[in-house]
Amino acid sequence: MRITPIKHRLERGSVFMIVVVIGGIMGIVTASMLMLSNNSLQNAHGRVDWNKAFYNAENAAVWAAQNAFDAQPVGLTNYYSIKNGHLPLAEIISPINGDTALKGAWVKVVQPNIALSNVFLVTASARVNDKVRTIQAMITIRPVSQVFDYEYFLNNWGWWWGATITGNGGQRANWDFDFRGNPQVNGAIYAANEVQENEQPYPQSSPPFGGLAGADPTDLVHQGAPRVTMPNLLDFSTYTATAMADPANNGIWVGGNQVVAGVLQNTNTPNPGGNAGNLSPQTGLYLAGTASQPITIKGTVVIPGDLVIQGQITGQGTLYVGGNLYIANNITYANGPNFSPPPETMPPTQRDTWAQNNMSKDLVAFAVRGSILAGDVTCSDWKSWCYDIGNTSSGLAGVGSEATLGADGIADTGDDHIPFLEPNSTMGTWYDADGDGHINANYNYNTDINMDSARASHILGYPTDSSHQPQPLPYNQVATDDMGTLDGIFYTDHAAAMRLAQNASIFYGALVSRNEQIIFQSTIVMNYDSRIHSRYHNNPNQFINLGLPSGATIQVNGFTELPPDSTDL
């Protein structure tokens, strides 16, 4: 029997066609996969370039914030660009691992309001291959520290013991804040650790304070709040440069006589009891104001040594004191605001109106590298209450040591005496709280506080007894404990020790310190001056540029991304 081959040829043809079709499909799939892979790779590179462009623009903005402002005055518009050769961003334009993708960057710096001399709008663009990103930030250079947002700020344990204490404003402590005797608190309370009642955790039952905080503790009492860094006053160079930039308008006047132009210049006078060749450098200053001749303070002023002050003051500005601030008697504004009722007890809109209506009134700050000492420090009553007081942890004799503070920098806490890794890479228990590079001991009365003739001899204008040859008057003839009124903003990262012997004591402004020993007679009222709060810092209608100590180099107030702008790239 014979079989014809036609059917097999047809079967082989069908198989061949199937192979061709499958091969074509596989080719299409492979090509598609290659195209998809290529597109994915391109997209991946695009995303990398997109991200790089953003980070490079951000770096350009940071460079401007750190460098451009010091290089030249910033006006209404300043441009910096790689293309024009004045944007030296070596860290982002130099090849890194062969990556030279960055083609350029530019930064535009604008001062939106000439009245706000340290607030700027920074716009930056950068290109990586064909990707361009543009960002914009509103920044403040050397912003005022947040410690000035409170009438009473302690870089330590806060304590209000007494039913006759009244606070009209917010108060904050960088550790526990302890209350006893039901003081009146008309404002918020912040504690970095606990709010306490007589050294016991709050609440035990009802709040240990009255006023607005006692009526609404859920809203106004904040435990476990972040600690706020104190400004460091070791370096006065920035404030000195500001003061000397315009000495005709930065200074101190008594009557019509300008006694300091920007910075008190050192003078040399014969030492008391010495001969004409035995000269004493006078880096400090004595000031006494009266109703007819108040002390006028304008702008930023630097006193390298001690400042002794009393009487009426007027103007707007900040005195930077390199030594101690000795408050010899009451300090009162000649043209101060009306604090009745206290602005911090008003509804917010009324408080803001109060601040705006008092923008031209007196407002003076004292930024002190040493300590703030009010009253007659040579009086046995002052020394007994403010320094000795049984040599307990309350008086200055028992505080100030940095040797065993532990890692948290606060005395009498759980980490005292426990070694930790110090900044110099050694193990120790010390904490350089004031950043002066030394491990300080407790306050020493003779060297840190007492106003003796040797110390007085370094103070320009200090009253003298000229009956024979000039001798500094004993401090008890210059100062008194019979005082109790203080107008102004008082800052130190050391001690604020005051003996206020008048029956009623009252503050108008703010008090910020590390160690506090205020001994008042019967009542004390602290009224916060709402004009200094940082919430007004960027509002030109509610801003007084006192030149207060800064808490950081840069503060970002707003940040956004804009549509890509290739200008000057």
Image: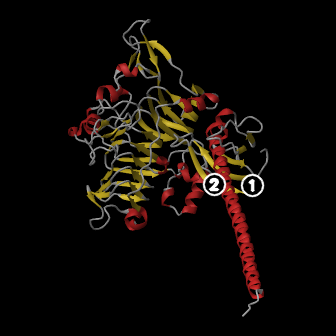
Residue 144 picture quarter: top right
Q: Quadrant of the N terminus?
A: bottom right
Give SS at disc 1: loop
Residue 418 as seen in the image, left or right of residue 359: left
Q: Is residue 187 above or below residue 491?
A: below
Which amino acid is tagged 1?
Pro
Give the residue pinned by disc 1.
564
Q: CA distance from mark 1 to mark 2?
A: 15 Å
Can see residue 138? yes
Residue 497 picture quarter: top left
| Other-residue count near label 2 (Cα within 10 Å), few / some / many at <14 / 14–19 / ≥20 | some
Give SS at disc 2: strand
Which amino acid is tagged 2?
Phe
Can see residue 119? no
Q: Is residue 301 above or below residue 65?
A: above
In the rendering, at what x and y percent does residue 376 appear?
A: 34, 32
Q: Kindly identify which numbered label has been placed on residue 559.
A: 2
* Mark whose residue sits in front, 1 or 2: 1
Q: Kindly identify which numbered label has been placed on residue 531.
A: none
In the rendering, at what x and y percent does residue 528 appear?
A: 47, 51
